[in-house]
Image (spheres, rainbow, N blue to C red):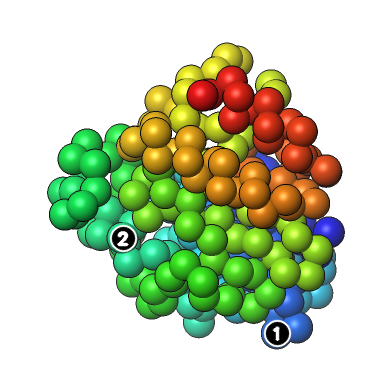
């Protein structure tokens, strides 16, 4: 695995993905995680060159401002759709389910300098559509080893589950999901990628996750 997981209480994850030019940070966790991310990069002996956000919820963008404050010259990227959420615009777009976006959506001080779209490549990471939890939610597939950084499309705390239906003991991702049918469709699409490893926003990465993803989809269907 070409990444390092940084976790707060084993509950909320950020990932440091090693590339030829340095580190891509996938999500930044809750506030207070920045120093841990920087320390992990220092242990690896590599510089952080970019931050990619799977979606706009506070537990994934919560340390962006602090991290950028420490690093100064670093690109921050998110989809254009979820960038609107970070700017306080929660209105549905034409053609979307006309449902209110849920969850805590902070307004960052940091200017998001990059926009990423489905099909883009960020270093070795391919941007994959995974809407549902938020309208612009994405996943990132490492083309080297097929690790799937899935944000909140799946979680592995207390078992593998999608964010399409609340499941105990960890119902929080589903409770913050914008449109559950779309989230379920995204979970199925991510399963079809047949990842070798599932790296979620919440819980430990899972090797050979296919059967567990199938069970999670069946539970939510």
Front residue of this view, candidates 131 and 62: 131
- The reply, left or right, for residue 113 in relation to residue 213 is left
Q: Residue at x 33, y 37 (%)?
A: 178
Disc assigned to residue 21: 1
Counting labels gives: 2
Instruction: Read off the residue under disc 2.
Output: 81
Quarter of the figure with the N terminus: bottom right
Q: Dot 2 lies on which element?
A: helix
124 in relation to 190, above or below: below
- The reply, left or right, for residue 15 in relation to residue 112 is right
Q: Residue at x 77, y 49 (%)?
A: 197
- Crowding around mark 2 (Cα neighbors within 10 Å: few <14, some 14 to 19, many 20+) is many
Please provide percent x and percent y for residue 158. Answer: 69, 21
Please provide percent x and percent y for residue 150. Answer: 59, 49
Does residue 197 appear anywhere in the picture? Answer: yes
Q: Earlier in the sequence, mark 2 or mark 1?
A: 1
Does residue 31 appear anywhere in the picture? Answer: no
Please provide percent x and percent y for residue 211. Answer: 76, 33
Q: Residue at x 55, y 55 (%)?
A: 139
Residue 125 occupies which quadrant of the picture?
bottom right
């Amino acid at each position: 695995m070409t990444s390092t997981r940084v976790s707060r209480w084993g509950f909320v994850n950020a990932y440091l993905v090693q590339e030829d030019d340095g580190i891509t940070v996938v999500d930044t966790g809750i506030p207070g995680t920045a120093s841990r991310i920087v320390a992990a990069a220092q242990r690896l002996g590599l510089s952080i060159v970019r931050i990619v956000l799977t979606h706009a919820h506070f537990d994934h963008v919560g340390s962006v401002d602090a991290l950028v404050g420490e690093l100064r010259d670093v690109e921050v990227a998110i989809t254009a759709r979820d960038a609107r959420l970070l700017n306080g615009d929660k209105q549905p777009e034409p053609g979307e389910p006309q449902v209110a976006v849920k969850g805590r959506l902070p307004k960052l001080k940091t200017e998001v300098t990059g926009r990423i779209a489905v099909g883009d490549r960020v270093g070795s990471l391919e941007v994959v559509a995974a809407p549902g939890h938020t309208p612009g939610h994405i996943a990132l597939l490492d083309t080297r080893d097929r690790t799937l950084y899935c944000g909140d499309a799946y979680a592995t705390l207390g078992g593998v589950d999608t964010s399409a239906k609340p499941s105990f003991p960890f119902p929080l991702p589903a409770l913050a999901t914008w449109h559950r049918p779309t989230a379920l469709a995204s979970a199925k699409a991510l399963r079809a990628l047949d990842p070798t490893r599932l790296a979620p926003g919440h819980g430990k990465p899972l090797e050979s996750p296919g059967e567990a993803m199938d069970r999670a989809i069946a539970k939510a269907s």
